[in-house]
Image (cartoon, coloured by chain):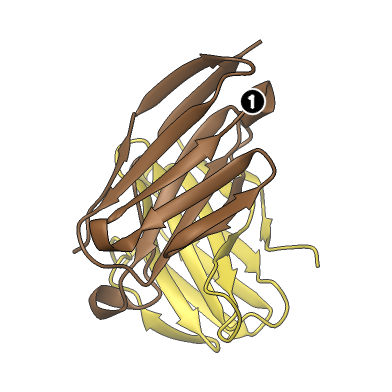
Amino acid sequence: GIQVEQSPPDLILQEGANSTLRCNFSDSVNNLQWFHQNPWGQLINLFYIPSGTKQNGRLSATTVATERYSLLYISSSQTTDSGVYFCAVENYLQGAQKLVFGQGTRLTINP
Amino acid sequence: DAGVIQSPRHEVTEMGQEVTLRCKPISGHDYLFWYRQTMMRGLELLIYFNNNVPIDDSGMPEDRFSAKMPNASFSTLKIQPSEPRDSAVYFCASRHNRVQNEQYFGPGTRLTVT
């Protein structure tokens, strides 16, 4: 099945810093989502982005489907950005409706 | 909309007991998913339904696990008998068939089996 690798596994930054999180996937995808799991465990949708670029406030994401990677950018980090960021992908040929998750990037923003 | 609703939020039970987790999907969503999250295995799909019909249960770990969706607004995941290795956070998610392909997750149920 499709493999999803996220890097770095851990990232510790000071408030105000910028960060880039990466997601590599092993096959073509029909669906790619970025999630933020906050310290209370809630999985929050950030982006649905199988290709192209999207922005939402301080967050933006870019997926280059032909090169099989996606990037999540966080600018001017705040302590509330802390948590684990997951990339999840779906390939209809390998299992429609099956989101395959990466292992996540744990982001810690210190005040 | 209230989002995906799960209950209970926390469950502590003894080995051998039956556990029932509940989920109410977002109104109008055609797909419902059950996931399990553990430190060792991360987030993994257990089963999903389309229009209340189970489509793929290949992720269900063993016969002790069962899931039902008696109507469009309710689903259960049952573990009988429960074992300590079932301790995990169980998430329910839903998706609309004809709008964007995003899945929306509930808050999860943290299950501890002692």
> Above or below — where is B106 with respect to A109?
below
Structural crowding at the residue carrying mark 1, measured as other residues with C-alpha within 10 Å and reported as few (<14), some (14–19) or many (≥20): few
> Above or below — where is A21 with respect to A87?
above
The x, y position of residue B101, in whole percent, is 52, 73
**What colour do you see for chain A?**
brown
| Chain of the residue under label 1 | A
- Res A32 quadrant in image: bottom left
Which quadrant, please, contains the N terminus of chain A? bottom left
Which one of the lettered chains is coloured yellow? Answer: B
The x, y position of residue B52, in whole percent, is 54, 86
Instruction: Say which of B88 and B16 sits in front.
Output: B88
Residue A98 placement, left or right of A15? left
The x, y position of residue B63, in whole percent, is 30, 68
Please tell me how many numbered marks the rendered image carries.
1
Q: The disc labelled 1 sits on which kind of residue?
A: Ser
> Above or below — where is B24 with respect to A16?
below
- Residue B94 in sight from this viewpoint: yes
Secondary element type, mark 1: loop
Q: Residue at x 21, y 63 (%)?
A: A27
The furthest residue to the right:
B1
> Which residue is the site of mark 1?
A76
Q: Residue at x 60, y 36 (%)?
A: A38
Q: Residue at x 32, y 68 (%)?
A: A29
